[in-house]
Every structure is written in structure tokens, then in C-alpha cells.
Image (spheres, rainbow, N blue to C red):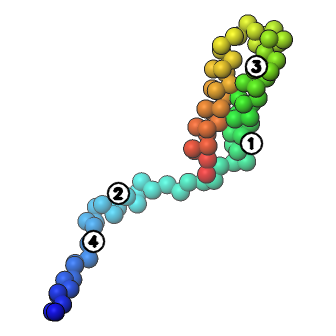
């Protein structure tokens, strides 16, 4: 059985102006500082602890009783803030 011919493709070279504009926009991203990681993990842990304390002893802590359902917003808000920070961590 005869073999098919292999066709050579021409090499793609982008236009000159595309290369110049791309190089001007490129930024070197620096790694995150050490405090960023500590704050990120701290926010997630504080949010988790807030919700756990509310479930375990929320009826004995006066300001948690007055906050009632807002305790969930505070706890989950802190955890979400930590998770959003983790997306920007380098």
C-alpha cells in the first residue's frame, strides 16, 4: 500500500507590532510577602473558629447572642476573604 506524502507546514511568525506590544505589557510578578500567607491562613482559621464557637457556646456569650444569624456572615465572610487572598498568593 502506498504511503501518503508528508506536507510541510510553513512556520508561523507573528507580525512585528504584536511582538512589541506584548513585551511592553508583560510584568514580572513578585512573590507574596510572608505576612500575606499568615494573614490568609489566619482569616480562614478565625472564620472557622468563629462558627465553631457560635455552635458550641454561642448561647453563653452575650455579644454572640445579640448578633444571632450574623455570626454566620462574620465567620463565612472571614473564610471567603482568606480564600480570595489565596487566589492572589504567589
Quarter assignment of residue 29: bottom right
User: CA separation, marks 4 and 1?
Assistant: 46 Å
Which residue is denoted by mark 1 in the rendering?
38
> Looking at the image, which is closer to me, 23 or 37?
37
Q: Residue furthest bottom?
A: 1
Which residue is denoted by mark 4 in the rendering?
13
Mark 1 neighbour density, 10 Å: few (under 14) some (14–19) many (20 or more): few
| In the image: residue 56, left or right of residue 23 | right
First of labels 1, 3 by sequence position: 1
Name the residue: 42% across, 54% down: 25
Which mark's residue is nearer the viewer, 3 or 4? 3
First of labels 3, 4 by sequence position: 4
Which mark's residue is nearer the viewer, 1 or 3? 3
Which residue is denoted by mark 2 in the rendering?
21
User: CA separation, marks 1 and 3?
Assistant: 24 Å
Mark 2 neighbour density, 10 Å: few (under 14) some (14–19) many (20 or more): few
Which residue is denoted by mark 3 in the rendering?
54
Amino acid at each position: 500500500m502506498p504511503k501518503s506524502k508528508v506536507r510541510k507546514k510553513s512556520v508561523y511568525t507573528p507580525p512585528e507590532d504584536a511582538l512589541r506590544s506584548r513585551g511592553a505589557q508583560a510584568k514580572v510578578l513578585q512573590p507574596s510577602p510572608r505576612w500575606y500567607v499568615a494573614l490568609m491562613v489566619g482569616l480562614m482559621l478565625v472564620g472557622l473558629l468563629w462558627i465553631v464557637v457560635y455552635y458550641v457556646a454561642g448561647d453563653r456569650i452575650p455579644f454572640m447572642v445579640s448578633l444571632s444569624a450574623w455570626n454566620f456572615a462574620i465567620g463565612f465572610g472571614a473564610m471567603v476573604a482568606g480564600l480570595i487572598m489565596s487566589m492572589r498568593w504567589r
